Amino acid sequence: MSLLDALRAAVGGQHVLTDADAAPYLSDWRDRYSGQALAVVRPGSTDEVAAVLRLCAAHGAPIVPQGGNTGLCGGATPDASGQAVVLSLLRLNRIRAMDLDNDTMEVEAGCVLQSVQEAARAADRLFPLSLAAEGSCTIGGNLATNAGGTQVLRYGNMRELTLGLEVVTAEGEIWHGLRGLRKDNTGYDLRDLYIGSEGTLGIITAATLKLYPQPVAHCTALLALDSIEDGVAMLALARRGLGASLTGFELMAGDCLQDVVRCFPQQRLPFEGASADLPWYALLELSDSESEAHARERFEAVVGEAIESGHVRDAVIAESMAQSKALWHLRESIPLAEKESGKSIKHDVSIPVSRMAAFVRDTNLALQRAFPGIRHVIFGHLGDGNLHYNVARGEGWAEGELLSRQAAVYELVHDSVHAVGGSISAEHGVGQLKRDVLPRYKDPVEIALMRRIKHALDPTGIMNPGKVLG
């Protein structure tokens, strides 16, 4: 029996897509990577996933796992050979259980993040992972890349939000690791090994996630800044004054917000005069468990201190949930406005907060010397040091001209990141985008250990080949 016939027998013929039906699964969200596949297979249960992996292992067929296909590094796109099986997990979309006494929920990998947030909210709980693609990205993809988002400062990445996993191995065995324990020292932490591995070690099919109490009150403010140094100083003030209640601290270049207003006229920057044309802005959020009055008093005290000290030029504090959402919508629309403006060279990097201002200043200067007239599109999660440092075409630059210099731009930016003790990937993963440059910045022993782990868990090399490790 051919592999295609065996796959149809395992999951049903209607869930094995070929030719034109497979096309939507073969390109990434940014339209930077496209490939071919033998088939797109859509299993409906963990047992079916295991059956698919056993068949692919027997036939030596590569497997490319895919969730919502919202990744930015080509990690879920097959190569051009047409030999791979794309394994779509979108049908694994059940919320299996919720344990409110233990503050956990068990969900399948194909659940859309927004659906998980809403299910938690309906039970008067919070699942805090939040990011721009939450209406289409899936929990499996979030786990595969160890997603972060806007609330890492308080709640952590997906590793910190996950207690247990269910995983199908490269041989088609099922690891039943859906434990809801916060303490379990019975050996190696396989959970953390699979999270962030981008489907190169096995297929995550379900997870036990942490839940939190719903905050009683939120306070949100958009701050106008003269410099990144002022943003770093404001972050220190917020940490000291708000403590664990500080939920988010986002940094945005003024050009980014102007792009949002230009591309989406229904949105507007809530400042007038000089404050509407400053080089930097920050979005500050507090989540309080005591009361609205308590939250507002602490929040206004911190913002007032920042204005008096000169670290903040102006501030707009949301007076309602609608206004808060409008401020966050400005931040979340930056990637959409960037896409409207054409393809760019994206960097998802981590920088020590203490080196952030120097990194941006020095790297901007170096890029302008090397590529006069390019545009800097800079925004990110200053609270945890994660910067989206993107390079777009400036006036007089054609899109193709910019992209033809991608390798040189990457090298310059990544060398700058490495020089300040940073990481070339913060929350988007490595995929195929950064695969070939990873050895330049990773310790050789670390790369060797990663290869040994890969060979031990995927000895035939069928799990998402060509991603993370070359």
Image (cartoon, rainbow, N blue to C red):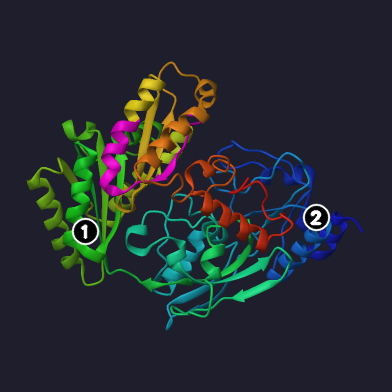
Whether residues under marks 2 and 1 lie with C-beta atoms below 8 angstroms apart, the answer is: no
Q: Residue 60 carries which label?
A: 2
Q: Nearer the viewer, residue 228 or 200?
A: 200
Apparent side of residue 27 relative to residue 212 in the rendered image (left or right): right
Q: Residue 239 carries which label?
A: 1
Give the alpha-carbon distance from disc 2 to disc 1, as whole Å: 52 Å
* Amino acid beneath label 2: Gly
Placement of the C terminus among the 4 image quadrants = top right
Residue 414 falls within the magenta-colored stretch: no
The residue at the point 17 percent across, 60 percent down is 240
Where are the magenta residues, as a range? 341-363
Q: Residue 381 carries which label?
A: none
* Amino acid beneath label 1: Arg
The residue at the point 40 percent across, 42 percent down is 418
Please say whether residue 136 is visible from this viewpoint: no
Q: Please determine whether, in this image, residue 253 is positioned above or below residue 427.
A: above
Counting residues from the N terminus, which is met first, the one under dot 2 or under dot 1? Answer: 2
The residue at the point 52 percent across, 49 percent down is 444
Q: Which of marks 2 and 1 is in front?
A: 2
Please say whether residue 205 is visible from this viewpoint: yes
Residue 342 falls within the magenta-colored stretch: yes
Residue at disc 1, secondary structure: helix
Apparent side of residue 237 relative to residue 323 in the rendered image (left or right): left
Q: How crowded is mark 2: few (under 14 residues within 10 Å), some or many (20 or more)?
A: some
Apparent side of residue 98 relative to residue 27 in the rendered image (left or right): left
Q: Where is residue 383 in the image (x, y as percent from the top left)?
A: 30, 53
Placement of the N terminus among the 4 image quadrants = bottom right
The residue at the point 46 percent across, 76 percent down is 104
Residue placed furthest toward the front: 445
Q: Where is residue 187 in the image (x, y as percent from the top left)?
A: 53, 77
Apparent side of residue 267 relative to residue 304 in the rendered image (left or right): right
Q: Position of residue 300 (x, y in %)?
A: 14, 56
